[in-house]
Image (cartoon, grey):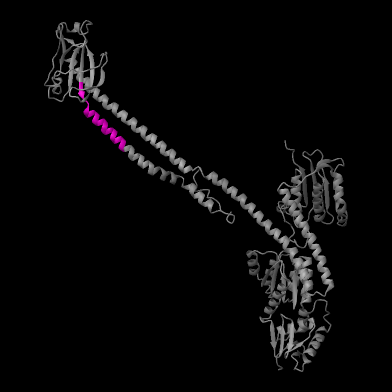
Amino acid sequence: MRLLLVEDSARLRGSLGRGLGRAGYVVDSTGDGNEGLWFAESNQYDTIVLDLMLPGLDGLTILRRLRQQQNRAPVLILTARDTVEDRVRGLSAGADDYLVKPFAFEELLARIQALCRRRYDSPNPLIVIGDLAVDTAARTVKQAGACIDLTPREFMLLEYLAARRGEVVSRREIEAHIYDDAVDPMSNVVDSAICSLRRKLGAHGVTPLIRTRRGMGYVLESAPR
Amino acid sequence: MTSIRRRLTVWVLAGCSVLWAGGAAGLYLDLRAGLLGEFDATLTARAQALAALTRQRGTVVELDFPGEFMPGFERGGAADYFQMQRADGGVFDQSPSLDGHVLAGAAAAAATPQYADVTLPDGSPGRAITLRFTPQSGDDETADSDRNSSTAPAVIVIVALHRSALDDRLKALATTLFGAGVLLAFVTLVGVPVLVRRGLSPLDAVAEQARGIDGASLERRFPSTSLPAELAPICGRLNELLARLQASFERERRFSADVAHELRTPVAELRAAVEVALRWPGDVAEATLALQEAHEIAVQMDGLITRLLTLARCEAGLQPVTREPVYVAALLQEVWEPLAAQAARKQVVTTWAVTEDTCLDTDRTLLRAIFSNLVANAVEYCPEGGSIGVCVPDGHDPWQLEISNTVAELATDDVSHLFDRFWQGDPRRAASFHSGLGLAVSKALAASLGMDITAQLASPTVLRLALTRRCERA
């Protein structure tokens, strides 16, 4: 899942960026409002974490502009403003969640996970596809009751495919949500990751779930068609 | 506690009582005098009529008493009495109604009629006139020559009438006035408190409105148009007081919110750094980074708390001041040195006009803190290629130091907020290391030193701050 973190405190931005990255998210971060808007307009984020008091462009203006552009990315406002009026103003402007500083990192993580699930209409953190169970909260994968050991990147790929199960997901979309901008568009990292994931899932002798749609992308299905 | 209503009621009641009692007494006395006057006029008319009927024939004085025309003097009549007597007291005629009794008139009859209250022969109260006159002569041919003869003996006539009717009328009058007084007193006792209460009801309304105003409703105001003229100025002043209170409360609320914000952000930074490090405890690099950040945050919060405490000390008048001779130019040079490199990097043009012998009797440490803040701000906010000027105007009384610098984006409205606690023109509160307290602290420190700091835009792109020593107190 790809997140955008717009926070003007460099220290907080650094800590959260590292923490969220270690938690399995791809994080773009910036401390400037204009740059944050540009990031949000240029990419499809699974969740945007947005501070309100920002240089250049304040958080509420960014939020309103995104909603005017029909940008449906879930937005979590992360701010020191704690009055009821502030919360109402933020949620009324189109935010999906509101968290007041200081906060527990675990809580932020849980809220981001919830917003990411909501993004793909999956309120249940446990996604079951056939005999495959992906627990996005515990970040574990079981197939036919057996635990499968995945790398963080492989888990992110499976989580994304599971969130969009039944849909064809293009390589470009996978790159956008799983990899940061450092990835060369011409590289075959996606194919390699899919291959690795198939191998681990197939090691248990079950029919492969990830299918290739030639020229289109990949789809995770419960049963072969 | 003194009550205006009670005092006003007592005063009005006392005033009305005196007024009513005085009025009733005056009215009674006036009517009594009128009735007595009428009574005395009747007496006078009777006496003069008798005098006119009295003739002197030679040495004999006779009264030609027409009993049929004056039936009151007859025995068994209306019990009017008269008595004619000589000046020596010899009675020579009296009304049949006296039936031989003697009337006691005035002791020494004067030329003018004398009136007196007497006891009549039947024992009842009466009033009598004693009139001294010279009877007319009974001889027609000598009448004119003898009428005013000084040799004619004077005659005294005493006429007395019953005054029971007069006393009854006076008694009835007194009773009526007393009854009216009692009624008025009752009406006053009941009516005055009601009227006073009604008259003071606007005060009650104002008190009720004041009771409803508390810290959460300071936006309320007393009505200024519907009030009586006496209360309007009071409510006007109260409204001004409320406005000042509201502004003060608002400032305090904003200050609390700002303090909370300024503390929340570093606490959030601290918590996030530590929690991320704790979540992956094996990552030594992350733990080291978290410790470094924790130290930076602690230093930053220490500075914030120190500035807040300094502000509180200054505002409470508890900031200690140790005066000594301080050379301004040397002190400015001292605070400039660590900033010179930053100014050079920004290619700032500096102009100094401070004579080296300028010396102040002040607290060196506090003045240094003020200079540091003002000069550091000038360097920080001066755009690249801008200019900074530091000067002490010659002959300026009182003493003044001006620090001006080029500014990129500063509106006139912003200047009025420069000394507000936590105000920052740039919303990047967390991104910068400025808390927005520097100028507020400098102003408070300057006040402790008997100085003031003011700010103005000398031009749209030049901000000038002036540190001015206040006039010496007498």
Residue B227, relative to residue A63: is it above or below?
above
Residue B8, relative to residue B130: is it above or below?
below
Q: Is residue B208 left or right of residue B365?
A: left
Query: Magenta part mainly helix, strand or loop?
Result: helix
> Is residue B178 found inside the magenta-colored segment of the image?
yes
Where does the image place residue B153, in percent across and percent down from the top left? 20, 8
Judging depth in this view, the residue of B105 and B259 nearest the camera is: B105
The answer to whether residue A30 shows anywhere in this view is no
Looking at the rendering, the stretch of residues picked out in magenta corresponds to: B160-179
Residue A100, relative to residue B230: is it above or below?
below
Q: Quadrant of residue A177?
A: bottom right
Q: Quadrant of residue B184?
A: top left
Residue that lies at the very extreme toward the front in this rendered image: B123
The answer to whether residue B200 shows anywhere in this view is yes
Task: Count numbered badges in the picture.
Answer: 0
Q: Is residue A208 left or right of residue B167?
A: right
> Is residue A100 found inside the magenta-colored segment of the image?
no
Where does the image place residue B214, in percent across and percent down from the top left? 57, 54
Q: Is residue B276 left or right of residue B17?
A: right
Q: Residue at x 23, y 31 (%)?
A: B168
Q: Residue at x 60, y 50 (%)?
A: B243
Quadrant, the C terminus of chain B: top right
Q: Quadrant of residue B132?
A: top left
Judging depth in this view, the residue of B457 and B112 nearest the camera is: B112
Residue that lies at the very extreme toward the left in this rendered image: B68
Where does the image place residue B220, in percent across and percent down from the top left? 56, 53
